[in-house]
Image (cartoon, coloured by chain):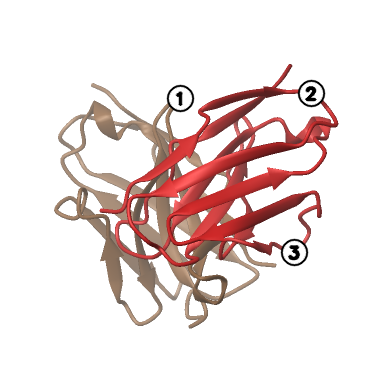
Chain colours: A brown, B red
Amino acid sequence: QVQLQESGPGLVKPSETLSLRCSVSGGSVSNDNYYWSWIRQPPGKGLEWIGYIYYSGFTNYNPSLKSRVSISLDTSKNQFSLKMSSVTAADTAVYYCAILRPDYSDAFDVWGQGTRVTVSS
Amino acid sequence: DIQMTQSPSFLSASVGDRVTITCRAGQSISNFLHWYQQKPGKAPKLLIYAASSLQSGVPSRFSGSGSGTDFTLTISSLHPEDFATYYCQQSYSTPRHFGQGTKLEIK
């Protein structure tokens, strides 16, 4: 069973870049059956899809965030990463990494536990 | 964008009740609709994918139905551990929007 674990700074200053990593265990980021995804949840609010990356490097982002977001793979560390630039308080959220399963009609099957990020000076 | 609207936003029910949550898509999404359960402080958990397929390990009291624009999640007999927030999500097109959530509370 594949497991995911997010990591990264819990506090980021406004206008700076948020950087998070998702470590994959029990599977490989080179697996062509999965898309590696990021989703976030502001405090007390609902879920927002950020984007995903395929093993080939293909990416798909939420248009509302596309200009500020980049997702990448690190096969040597079996991780994938999220970078979000020019953050504001509106980017304060719990950030989840998740696996999108094409064989499940693109449902998000496995989730990390989430990491809380606060944007504040 | 395809917006997803859930109803109700809040639902109060008792153990043993049968409950139904509805999700409506802004346009037809075929059966590209999924349901998740989220408990406080925890990550969402996939319950139903492709509108009606039960994820492995999920109790059979959960079921999903619908296609096109209208979908339902039904819990046939509520257990204490079912009190949580439920989200629908479409995967027909980008962006992959979620519904706003339905909080199921104990009456």
Residue at point 37% right, 50% down?
B97
Residue at point 21% right, 49% down?
A65
Tag shown at residue B56: 3
Left or right side of B67 for A10: left
Residue at image mark 2:
B14
Residue at point 63% right, 47% down?
B73
Callout 3 secondary element: loop
- Structural crowding at the residue carrying mark 3, measured as other residues with C-alpha within 10 Å and reported as few (<14), some (14–19) or many (≥20): few
Say which amino acid is labelled 2.
Answer: Ser
Q: Position of residue B11 (x, y in %)?
A: 62, 25
Q: Is label 1 in contact with label 2 (beta carbons under 8 Å)?
A: no
Left or right side of A64 for A117: right
Q: Which one is nearer the viewer's eye here, B71 or A57?
A: B71
Q: Chain of mark 1?
A: A
- Structural crowding at the residue carrying mark 2, measured as other residues with C-alpha within 10 Å and reported as few (<14), some (14–19) or many (≥20): some
Callout 1 secondary element: loop
The lab-note entry on whether marks 1 and 2 share a chain reads no
Say which amino acid is labelled 1.
Answer: Gly
Residue at image mark 1:
A44
Callout 2 secondary element: loop
Q: Position of residue A100 (x, y in %)?
A: 49, 66
Q: Which one is nearer the viewer's eye here, A114 or A10?
A: A114
The lab-note entry on whether marks 3 and 2 share a chain reads yes
Q: Marks 1 and 2, Cα distance to the nearest angstrom?
A: 24 Å
